[in-house]
Image: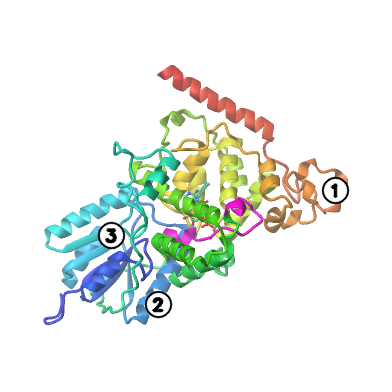
Amino acid sequence: MTKPGLPAPFIMWFRNDLRLSDNPALHAAAAGGAPLICLYVHEKDEEGLRPPQGASLWWLHGSLASLNRSLAAEGGRLHVLAGDAGEILDALVEASSACGVHWNRRYDPSGREIDARIKARLRDKGIAVESFNGSLLHEPWKVTTRAGSPFQVFTPYWKEALRRGDPPMSLPAPTRMSFADVPRAVAKRFAYRFELDADPQKPDWAASMRGLWKRSEEGAHERLHAFLDEDLKGYADNRDRLDRQSTSRLSPFLRFGNVSIRQVWHALAAREHAGSLKTTGRDIEKFKSELGWREFSYSLLYHYPSLHRDNIHPSFDGMPWRQDKAALEAWRHGRTGYPVVDAAMRELWATGSMHNRARMIVGSFLVKHLLVDWREGESWFWDTLVDADPANNPASWQWVAGTGADAAPYFRILNPVLQGKKFDPDGAYVKRWLPELERLPAAAVHHPWTAGAAVLDGAGIRLGDDYPRPIVDHDTARRRALASWKAMRGRDKEEL
Ligand code: FAD
């Protein structure tokens, strides 16, 4: 209960918006002048919610810690609880006599359902509940075709989104905030017991990631400005190059809201207007369109409730995916014998991230060369990516597998050798992640099995011992994938 004479507190429920600046829900809550209870809830893996796990949980932990430090600098703190969000909010509102709750929206169907239930129940009790757009340029229900249906194809989607104009200007961090605590009984009942796998000790699998990422609002802005000032130049040409570090590496920051999409958008626009970008329209448009793919993925998540479970194109329900544990394990751990695939999977393990072109190559390899269900890949990425995103991950996997909206057709099978040669011509990327191939000449690095005995000897490699032979032959695998796809389509036609 609020002590007599003290103003009723207001609850700010943080979710995928772990920042103080340009946080519309926080901004509005602070503007009301009530003391804030700043809350984060580790929700259970129930009702179809997909809480972060593995690498993205590690990111979340770092971000919560840094948000807590930012709040502490203002005299407050972040209260981290665990359990059912509805129960927690009921108990917290009751025990603290809070007069309102704010949050920024999420777009996964389970999260939306939970939020709608909480909103209705609290409003019935006379509590002021409001939700805001804190993570997208445009709400997904606003960017639709003239007939009001969701876009299935990216280009018209993005044209329509751009036609709607720039998003509102970013908001500053609140200048004056006062705070209240979670009453002790509630804190005790829903205490969050720190999970060991979130900040791993034995083994410390996050050791190699720790030095790479600054999981905070400050880290996000440093990355954003470094990208705009240094790396955006040449982005359109370099984006696909595996051996060049030319992309923004903003994805985990956007995923957890260490920075908002509006801040990215307006930082770019401000430099463009000031003429301080070192680059031309092409790089800018290309970068904006990648942000557009993120928006498009969120639109798909919003409109296709089981994006990570069900094929958008149900004809793929009859695809004869193979159950091949050994092949899946080889793929997961970078032991397929195709250097560009293996380098990418080892990059993922070491850094919690992977270049976009590499994600396309390893995705195609899994669902086409190995004929393994895309959901296996999606779930491995969900565990190992720091940016594991409820929209981008399943939408991109469905794109790669040919099962999704505006997807790469299944019959377009990426050849890992040619992809390696094209996007990593000197083999620098491969050699970085596969040091055992370090001494191979560039001409052989993407297909060591064709190198002669003298070349392999000279590079100190015994194929099969130091580095695996290919687990599938490209041409055979390609024929098998196409035959399976054709058989699936044949069955599909018979059923019509
Ligand atoms: P940049 O090239 O700098 O792009 C800027 C931002 O645009 C990114 O940070 C991201 O938010 C967005 N973006 C870029 N490409 C895409 C795309 N194809 N789809 C949607 N948004 C995009 N991205 C994730 O954020 N989380 C995921 O879980 C994820 N899983 C993927 C799985 C597969 C199989 C594939 C092919 C792609 C996946 N992507 C995912 C998309 C993309 O690979 C990453 O967003 C990108 O590599 C992140 O690097 P960056 O921040 O340097 O990107």
Between 240 and 304, the residue placed more toward the observer is 240
Q: Earlier in the sequence, mark 3 or mark 2?
A: 2
SS at circle 3: strand
Q: Magenta stretch mostly in which secondary structure?
A: loop
Looking at the rendering, the stretch of residues picked out in magenta corresponds to 236-255
Residue at point 69% right, 51% down? 424
Q: Amino acid at mark 1?
A: Val
Question: For residue 237: magenta?
Answer: yes
Which dot, 3 or 2, sits closer to the camera? 3
Q: Is residue 277 above or below residue 331?
A: below
Does any atom of ligand 1 lie closer than 8 Å to the CB of label 1? no
Look at mark 2 in the image and give the residue it sits on: 69
Name the spot of residue 455 as percent of width and height, x first: 85, 48
CA–CA distance in space, label 3 to label 2: 24 Å
The label shown at residue 132 is 3
Look at mark 1 in the image and give the residue it sits on: 455
CA–CA distance in space, label 3 to label 1: 61 Å
Q: Is residue 146 above or below residue 290?
A: above
SS at circle 2: helix
Query: Looking at this rendering, what residue extends furthest in the right direction?
Result: 454
CA–CA distance in space, label 1 to label 2: 55 Å
Task: Locate the N terminus and report the quarter of the image it occupies.
Answer: bottom left
Number of numbered discs overlaid on the protein picture: 3
